[in-house]
Structures are given as C-alpha cells and as structure tokens.
Image (spheres, grey):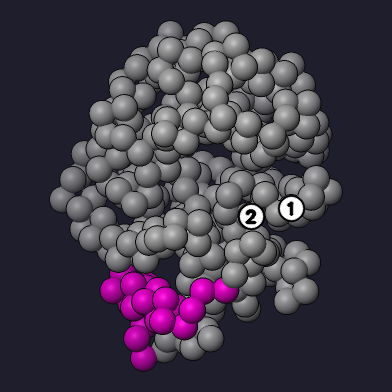
C-alpha cells in the first residue's frame, strides 16, 4: 500500500465523518464523496479517520479496516492518512496499529485506554505505547485528554513517554486548560526530538493557535477545513487581523457544534453537511440519536452567520 514516507504530523489535519445508511451500514458512496470534498481544500497536511468523528467506538475492526481501505483508495495518493487506534487493551491496540500500517496509514492517533478512567501510572502508559510502537514504525500521536477524566497523562508521564518512545512525534491536545496547554506548546515543541502540539481545542481554536501550536487536528474540519486552513496560515504569518476576521466566521459554527451535550458534536456536523448539500442524510449509530428540529435550525443559522449557507437557499434537513 502507498504511504507518505517520513511524514511528521503537523499543520491542518481534518478528522472526517463517516456517513451511514438508514440501516446503519456504512454509506460508502457518500463517504467517498466526503473524502474527496475535504481533501480538495488547499493547505491540508493529512486527514484523520477511525477517530471520534467517524464514530469509531461503534465500528468493528473489519469496518475500521474498510474505512482505511476506502480512504486509501480515494485520497491516499494525495494526502497522508492518520488512523485512530481506539482500544481498551494494549494487545488489541497493537493489532489495530499493525492493520493500519499494512493498509497504508502514515501516522497513528493513539486514544487513551478506557480503564485509565479508574487510575493510571507512568508504567501503564509506557507499556501501552511501547506495545504499539513495537508493532509498527509509524509515527504516533498521543491523544491528550483533560486530566480530570483520568485518561490524560500528567506532565511527568507525558515527558517520559516522549523520551522513551521515539516514534511519538505529536500530541492531539485536548487538555482543556490554557496554562497546561501552553506548557505543552513550550515544552514539547522544544524537546531535542520535537513533539508537535496539534490543537483540538476547536471551541477556542484562535486562542489556542496563537500560543504557538504547530498544527491542529479537528473534527469540525469535516465541515470548515477551508476556514481552519486559512486561520492557521494567518496565525503562522502573524496576520492577527486576518486571523480575527476568520475567527469571527468560525465562532458561530463552533458554538453550535460544541454545545452541550458535547457527545453530539459530530452528530451536529453531519446535520451541517446535509444542510450544505454535501451529505444525503445525518444518520448516527446508537447510543447517539438524531438531534431535534430546533437544534437543526440553530445549526442552519450558524452556517448562515458564518457565510457558509445562503439563507434563501437553505435546505430543510428534517
């Protein structure tokens, strides 16, 4: 399988959605179109699959492999593919990592194991990542959760991971704490073997990027990859006036997507793509359920306020 050699995770990396048929099977035709739509945006460095945005928790191993195969077929020659590693056990995580490497992925996004919600220590975290690293030489992205969840890695643990697992090349930063986030940026990106900080603080992306992140990895890129790429370029070029203008467009969409309950964020993004005429339906797998008409109306208004949807051409997604 083709792979983008020596890829180091950086820059703008949208995490795409996974469309489903009404019977909850994967809608492969719509997924292919969605991949092409997102990959056509200028300024991306990769795409992410088999992650939160593709409802990976409700996908079987075989479905994850099929998602990777389709993605490789559609955009693998154009962009590197970041494949999520979602597993409660390290042995299964290594199996997924091996599958992703064989399928042509260029990097792996490693989710924290669910048992860590009950407590963890550095030895456990190291054992998890070393087993994955032993299974493949692909660069690893550490998904850094908020410490309050139990799944986030304390500073000392994170530094030990970066020191002892050379294939760790980035973190997806979801720490949710501004001083801690800034510590990540200042510390990890200054290590002898640099570890890039990819922001996933999509509800306050402008503020996050200004701290100096070397990239962003976000599910809302499935809808607004172009605005995210423009924002990243503006911040990198120190054009903060332009960045603020772009952020003003992003803000209504971010508020709509990341409202409570937070678990519905990608559900809302599917509804947005239906409103934009880019998906035929917004089906999600249980335990997620279709959101109410009133919330769909709020998403429609957010798209109008962001200049993404003409109010006179808005479709009724109900």
Answer whether residue 274 is magenta in the image: no
Asked if residue 281 is positioned above or below residue 165 in the image, the reply reads below
The residue depicted at 16 percent of the width and 50 percent of the height is 241
Residue 211 percent location from the top left of the image:
26, 33
Q: Which residues are magenta?
A: 290-312
Residue 148, quarter of picture: top left
Residue at the spot of label 1: 59
Residue 165: image location, x then y, percent: 60, 13
* Residue closest to the far front: 118
Residue farthest to the right, as pictured: 62
The residue tagged 2 is 55
Q: Is residue 286 above or below residue 106?
A: below
> Left of 91 or right of it: where is 308?
left
Residue count near mark 2 (Cα–Cα under 10 Å), binned few <14, some 14–19, many ≥20 = some
Q: Quadrant of residue 208?
A: top left
Identify the residue at image location x=59%, y=70%.
289
């Amino acid at each position: 399988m083709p792979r983008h050699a020596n890829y180091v995770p950086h820059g703008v990396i949208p995490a795409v959605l996974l469309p489903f048929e009404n019977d909850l099977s994967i809608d492969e035709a719509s997924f292919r179109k969605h991949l092409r739509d997102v990959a056509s945006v200028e300024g991306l460095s990769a795409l992410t699959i088999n992650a939160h945005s593709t409802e990976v928790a409700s996908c079987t191993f075989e479905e994850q492999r099929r998602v990777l195969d389709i993605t490789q077929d559609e955009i693998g020659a154009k962009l590197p593919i970041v494949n999520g590693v979602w597993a409660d056990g390290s042995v299964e995580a290594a199996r997924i990592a091996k599958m992703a490497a064989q399928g042509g992925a260029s990097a792996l996004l490693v989710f924290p194991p669910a048992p860590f919600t009950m407590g963890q220590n550095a030895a456990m975290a190291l054992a998890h990542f070393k087993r994955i690293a032993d299974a493949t030489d692909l660069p690893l992205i550490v998904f850094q959760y908020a410490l309050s969840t139990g799944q986030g890695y304390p500073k000392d643990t994170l530094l030990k991971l970066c020191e002892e697992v050379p294939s760790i090349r980035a973190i997806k930063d979801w720490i949710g704490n501004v001083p801690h986030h800034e510590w990540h940026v200042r510390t990890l990106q200054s290590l002898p073997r640099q570890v890039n900080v990819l922001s996933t603080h999509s509800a306050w992306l402008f503020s996050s990027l200004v701290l100096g992140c070397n990239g962003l990895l976000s599910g809302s890129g499935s809808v607004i990859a172009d605005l995210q790429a423009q924002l990243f370029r503006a911040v990198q070029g120190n054009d903060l006036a332009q960045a603020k203008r772009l952020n003003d467009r992003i803000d209504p969409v971010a508020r709509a997507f990341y409202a409570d309950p937070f678990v519905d964020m990608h559900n809302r993004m599917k509804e947005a793509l239906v409103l934009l005429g880019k998906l035929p339906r917004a089906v999600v797998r249980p335990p997620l359920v279709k959101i109410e008409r009133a919330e769909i109306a709020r998403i429609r208004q957010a798209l109008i306020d962001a200049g993404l949807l003409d109010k006179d051409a808005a479709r009724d997604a109900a």
